[in-house]
């Protein structure tokens, strides 16, 4: 290649959405044909290479149909011609947990390495925006590049180049390349340099002059930081281009300033690095919508999928994995094969078109089945591990032990719910000091137990009580013969009011709440207002009809009643009927005149000694084409919202930027994990949630939490909020989300800032309730396994290692200041290693003592440890 020519790396690939506008099996038919053709090209052209979309799952799907071709595939993978991984499946980044992203890469790199080699480039071509912590996650797997498309406008505008250094909150950096002209910009490479390229149609808005290869190369050269250009030869569900090498050779003879060659993403990154360009640094998330849409409505499309995902992730991360890790140490039980299978099923639902809810209805039926299977496997691990741990500490005694697990590494008080044999449900409940504890009876259920020894179908009764729990460990309570103490209320509960040490809560007839914060004396009025608006959008974007009509619950009247009046808890309920337009008018420009009634039931609960107000909303949706939200007018004027994000707490503006000519309206609804908050330095207001990822905050401090967004189309091209289609125009009637839904959220008020008030810890308490198991026999007293400090540092994972013994402990610092963290154990630490996220050892650490590990954490830093304990000190 002549020295004065820019190097153009052509990467043959396919972007393979496993399920989307067709079902998985329908797409797999075409996948098999595509990879058959790839293997033909490998034989025909020794220079040919092919990237399988940065994921390994399509390879596994192919081999289920073509197992006889595994040997060929392994050879090409080992030779670096077929590139697979590092992901197991191409994920959405905002709708899944940070641990899910790590497990996605763990599984993807493991499987790819077993086949010969994992691609080590951070290829995320079509994710709907990117989290601020992605650089740190990638570096934790030895990956120092990121290739992105959507959302990158803030970085492009700030750095002025397609290449820049993208920095995570704690300082990790990757070389980031923005595919500004898309991942299909070289989908077809043949003919002359001036022949129009169909894949470039519509890119004139980027300033591309003329849809030809020559004009594309000139545009990319102008935007590049070095004399290296990337062309992606492929597109959605494309097979390989036949005769690509010959087409490139012909073009090279006709190009004066560019030289094309088939290569890889690594080849392109190396070409950029060799020139050592002066690259600017960008910090933060990528959620701009100027050049490419991030399709912000996916945060609330098919909300039932988001809730199911939350429940499975929560079950695995907070319960199944910690209990499996403890059971390995205390009872020598290895649950890793079950955990892996549960994660595989869950991760298959994390592909961006799957978890986003943007497919045809049959796709999401399959997702519901996967969620159910993953959850049942996790439940099996939880139950079996609990029994194993209990039996390891079992003593003689004819009673029922209630073994309560607290997944949080701090002391807490909370309600415990457990199933006990019906015949034992009328005894006395005592703690380890024989102090009697009040409890109440709830539902009775039939359960099947002891399958291998002759199944027993037994009636069990749920009982509920409140308990003080030790940090990450167990407390034991006992049901013994005797007459239980009569229940009496110590909370102030009347027909409309709940009161504990922290709050006085008044439930109004329209479902709104008036809350007195006893700590600050501030009164919040009109909280929990239902707001229903028309939605003329599709699965990708909310779009108001031209003539919008808003319906609220402010004028409704229901009857408030008491449903629980217990020594530790009070609950009030109100039932409402919300009259809502049945759908859109035939022309979709307004809401219909005909209305339907949507029954709504709110249950408001308050516990003694617990500072949060819990809300459970049950909605029987009977309307179409609408968005249902709940509003909290806090009165805290603010220019920013605060929300938990992946391994970080992010701040976002409450006013949109100027957006003339943007491809999609700037997003004012945003993603969250467990909480969103507003504050003014003196006081703050937070809303917690269980699996409700979309929020909005207005400049006047009103917090909106989306409950449902109901639409009937996969994609439309007549939206006021987005230009053009985002997919094919299939009807998706089940995206209207008709039927009964249940939503759980909570209110928390505080003084000072969210960091000072420990908001994230309180949110974790809400999203990680205690877990209990009734065991026949006496189990020894309470025990703590791990504690973590100081307040603010988060335990992200406690799990078995992917290989070998010990326990993996992962923590992170969401604060904007450095901390000195402490991890204490009840065991003697025999060895501690700091690891990368992929569990590769970094260094062996010195311990502060046999039970204590101290370590620094920078703002936003994630650290992973393998902790080994002495075998003669197992509690």
Image (spheres, rainbow, N blue to C red):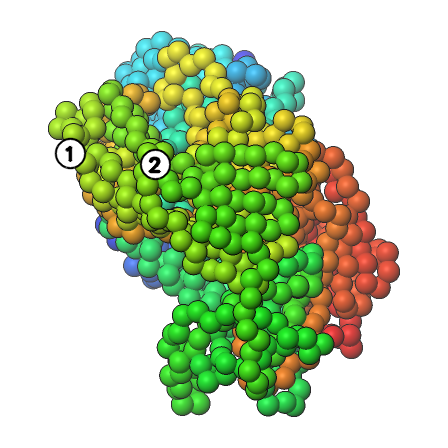
Mark number, residue 859: none
Q: Is residue 251 above or below residue 498?
A: above
Residue shown at the point (80%, 55%) measured from the top left: 853
Q: Is residue 783 above or below residue 185?
A: below
Q: Is residue 238 above or below residue 157?
A: below
Which image quadrant for residue 12? top left
> Within 10 angstroms of label 2, few (less than 14), some, or many (20 or more) residues?
many
Residue located beneath label 1 in the image: 594
Residue shown at the point (64%, 32%) measured from the top left: 683
Between residue 40 and residue 571, name the one nearer to us: 571
The quadrant in which the C terminus is found is: bottom right
Q: Is residue 120 above or below residue 545?
A: below
| Marks 2 and 1 close (CB-CB < 8 Å) | no
Residue extending furthest toward the front: 494
> Within 10 angstroms of label 1, few (less than 14), some, or many (20 or more) residues?
few
Q: CA distance from mark 2 to mark 1?
A: 18 Å
- Judged left or right of residue 250, residue 805 is right
């Amino acid at each position: 290649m002549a020295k004065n020519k820019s190097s153009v790396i052509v990467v043959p690939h396919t972007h393979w959405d496993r399920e989307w506008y067709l079902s998985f099996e329908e797409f797999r038919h075409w996948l098999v044909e595509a990879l058959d053709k790839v293997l033909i090209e490998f034989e025909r052209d020794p220079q040919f290479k092919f990237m399988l979309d940065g994921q390994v799952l399509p390879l596994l799907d192919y081999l289920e149909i073509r197992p006889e071709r595994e040997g060929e595939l392994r050879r090409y993978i080992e030779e670096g011609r077929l590139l697979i991984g590092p992901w197991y499946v191409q994920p959405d980044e905002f709708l899944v947990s940070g641990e899910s992203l790590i497990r996605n890469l763990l599984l993807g790199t493991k499987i790819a390495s077993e086949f010969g080699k994992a691609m080590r480039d951070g290829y995320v071509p079509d994710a709907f925006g990117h989290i601020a912590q992605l650089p740190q996650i990638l570096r934790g797997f030895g990956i120092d590049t990121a290739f992105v498309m959507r959302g990158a406008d803030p970085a492009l505008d700030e750095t002025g180049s397609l290449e820049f250094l993208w920095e995570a909150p704690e300082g990790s950096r990757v070389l980031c390349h923005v595919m500004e002209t898309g991942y299909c910009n070289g989908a077809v490479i043949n003919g002359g340099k001036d022949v129009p390229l169909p894949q470039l149609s519509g890119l004139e808005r980027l300033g591309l002059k003329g849809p030809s290869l020559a004009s594309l190369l000139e545009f990319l050269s102008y935007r590049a930081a070095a004399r290296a250009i990337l062309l992606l030869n492929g597109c959605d569900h494309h097979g390989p281009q036949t005769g690509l090498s010959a087409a490139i050779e012909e073009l090279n003879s006709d190009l004066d300033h560019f030289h094309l060659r088939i290569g890889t993403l690594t080849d392109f990154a190396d070409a950029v690095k060799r020139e050592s360009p002066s690259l600017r640094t960008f910090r933060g998330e990528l959620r701009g919508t100027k050049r490419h849409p991030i399709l912000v409505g996916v945060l609330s499309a098919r909300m039932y999928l988001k809730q199911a995902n939350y429940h499975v992730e929560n079950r695995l991360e907070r319960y199944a994995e910690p209990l499996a890790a403890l059971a390995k140490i205390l009872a020598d039980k290895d649950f890793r094969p079950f955990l892996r299978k549960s994660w595989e099923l869950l991760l298959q639902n994390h592909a961006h078109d799957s978890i986003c809810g943007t497919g045809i209805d049959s796709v999401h039926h399959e997702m519901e089945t996967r969620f159910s299977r993953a959850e049942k496997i996790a439940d099996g691990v939880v139950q079996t591990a609990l029994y194993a741990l209990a039996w390891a500490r079992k003593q003689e005694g004819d009673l029922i032990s209630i073994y309560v697990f607290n997944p949080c590494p701090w002391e807490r008080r909370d309600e415990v719910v457990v199933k006990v044999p019906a015949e034992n449900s009328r005894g006395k409940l005592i703690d380890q000091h024989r102090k009697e504890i009040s409890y109440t009876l709830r539902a009775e259920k039939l359960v099947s137990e002891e399958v291998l020894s002759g199944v027993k179908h037994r009636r069990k009764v749920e009982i509920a009580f409140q308990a003080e729990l030790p940090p990450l460990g167990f407390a034991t309570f006992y049901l013994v013969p005797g007459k239980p103490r009569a229940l009496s209320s110590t909370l102030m509960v009347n027909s409309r009011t709940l009161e504990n040490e922290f709050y006085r809560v008044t439930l109004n007839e329209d479902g709104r709440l008036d809350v007195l914060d006893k700590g600050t004396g501030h009164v919040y009025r009109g909280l929990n207002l239902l707001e229903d608006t028309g939605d003329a959008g599709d699965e990708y974007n909310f779009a108001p009809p031209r003539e919008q009509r808003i319906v609220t619950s402010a004028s409704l009247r229901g009857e408030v009643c008491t449903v629980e009046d217990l020594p530790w808890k009070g609950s009030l309920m109100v039932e409402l009927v919300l009259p809502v337009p049945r759908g859109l008018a035939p022309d979709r420009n307004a809401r219909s005149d005909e209305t339907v009634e949507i029954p709504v039931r709110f249950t408001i609960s308050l516990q003694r000694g617990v500072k949060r107000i819990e809300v459970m909303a049950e909605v029987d949706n009977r309307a179409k084409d609408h968005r249902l939200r709940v509003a909290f007018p806090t009165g805290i004027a603010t220019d920013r919202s605060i929300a938990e994000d992946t391994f970080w707490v992010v701040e976002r503006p409450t006013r949109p930027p100027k957006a003339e000519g943007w491809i999609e309206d700037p997003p004012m609804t945003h993603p969250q994990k467990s909480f969103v908050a507003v504050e003014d330095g003196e006081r703050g207001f937070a809303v917690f949630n269980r699996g409700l990822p979309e929020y909005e905050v207005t400049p006047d401090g009103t917090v909106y939490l989306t409950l449902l967004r109901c639409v009937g189309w996969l994609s439309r091209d007549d939206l006021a909020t987005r230009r053009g289609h985002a997919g094919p125009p299939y009807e998706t009637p089940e995206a209207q989300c008709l039927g009964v839904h249940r939503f759980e959220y909570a209110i928390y008020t505080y003084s000072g800032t969210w960091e000072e008030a420990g908001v994230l810890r309180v949110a974790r308490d809400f999203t990680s309730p205690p877990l209990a198991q009734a065991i026949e026999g006496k189990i020894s007293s309470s025990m703590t396994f791990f504690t973590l400090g100081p307040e603010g540092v988060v335990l992200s994972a406690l799990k078995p290692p992917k290989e070998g013994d010990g326990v993996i402990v992962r923590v992170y610092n969401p604060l904007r200041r450095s901390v000195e963290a402490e991890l204490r154990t009840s065991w003697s630490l025999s060895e501690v290693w700091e690891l990368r996220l992929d569990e590769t050892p970094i260094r062996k650490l010195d311990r502060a003592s046999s039970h204590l590990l101290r370590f620094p954490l920078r703002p936003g830093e994630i650290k992973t440890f393998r902790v080994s304990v002495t075998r003669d000190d197992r509690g």
